[in-house]
Image: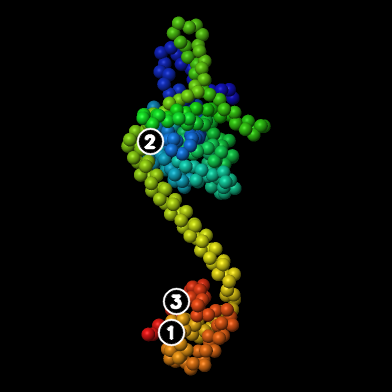
Amino acid sequence: MGVPKIIYTENSDKKNSWVKYILNRIRKNENFLCCINGPTGIGKTYTGISLGDMISKETNKEFNIHYIPFTFVELMRLINSDRLKKGSVIVFDEPQVAIGSKDHQSSINKAFHNLASTFRHKNYIMFFCNPFLEDLDKSVRKLFHAQFQITSKDEKSKEVSIKPYYLQWNPQKDKFYKHFLKIVSKDPGKSKPSIKPLKVWKIPHPPKELIQEYENKKTEFTNALNLKIQQKLEEAEFNVKDKQINEQFDFSKRLTKKQVDALFLYRQHKTLAKVAKILKKTVPSVHTSIQGARRKGFTEDNIEVYMKKFGIHHPMPIYE
């Protein structure tokens, strides 16, 4: 397949040539997958949202916050809903979180590869907003048609400049070839058309209402993600502590109920006589129970570790 071209006549509006190219693909019953890359904070997702807004105005298709999924499950719900039509735009935010290359053997990656390979006939337009193309699994990257690399942002106008590459995958060399879209136009007073590569495309800031909806959803997603990370860290910390405890104590030597009661109450009252009175046992009997527990490696100082391990909660009332 050759380098893609957009051909203009003398009176054509030459604005947003890539939008015209994308819509040409849709008219040809094809889809369009594009990765928007750039450093943190430069405006990758805003660029995707702006492109979605631009394209939807050309196609008269709906585009709002529901078309900006943050997780693979949310993406699948959108695809399986009745919202999407031919030429609908999806902006997949932070896809590396859901389908990152470090998890290349995961079921999610395999499922996403199958999805991207088979929904071509749906004629959807998808933008993936993440720092690097390499963040995504290789099997997924090979399906991309374009890469929009953000190079700069005007802090005053918030307009971003991108290098828009058309991607060609070479399976023999196992690599991408990048090309600029060629603009063919008939200039006034010239007999031959000019052919120029489109090396820079300036994308405006998206509408305020879309930004607000996105930021609200982003905050919810980030909070949920941070909570999930916290839970995983706490679980890992618990597992480490549990392993250390298991290595320190021999829980195969189970205590009798008498031994647990005696140690627990002795921890509270510090005298055999008091414990014997509460348990209605003799002092020698209580002493025997405590000594038996100590031979198994448990004392009044660590009896609560044993109780926690086996889910024992206050086996006897604590009397003053």
Give, as a three-letter code, the residue at label 3. His
Tag 3 or tag 2, which sits nearer the N-term? 2
**Separation of disc 2 and disc 3 at Cα?**
56 Å
Q: Nearer the viewer, residue 288 or 269?
A: 269
Residue 63's tag is: 2
Answer yes or no: is residue 293 visible. Answer: yes
> What x and y, as percent, mark residue 130?
49, 39
Give, as a three-letter code, the residue at label 1. His
Q: Residue at x 55, y 79 (%)?
A: 298
Q: Residue at x 55, y 83 (%)?
A: 293
Q: Nearer the viewer, residue 296 or 121?
A: 296
**Residue position for label 1:** 269
Tag 2 or tag 1, which sits nearer the N-term? 2
Q: Is residue 233 above or below residue 30?
A: below
Tag 1 or tag 3, which sits nearer the N-term? 1
Q: Residue at x 46, y 16 (%)?
A: 8
**Separation of disc 1 and disc 2 at Cα?**
70 Å
Give, as a three-letter code, the residue at label 2. Phe
Circle 3: element type: loop
Q: Residues within 10 Å of mark 3 (few under 14, many from 20)?
A: few
Residue 313's tag is: 3
Q: Nearer the viewer, residue 232 or 272?
A: 272
Circle 2: element type: loop
Q: Residues within 10 Å of mark 1 (few under 14, many from 20)?
A: some
In the rendered image, the residue lying farthest to the right is 172
Q: Is residue 270 above or below residue 132?
A: below
Q: Are marks 3 and 1 in contact (CB under 8 Å)?
A: no
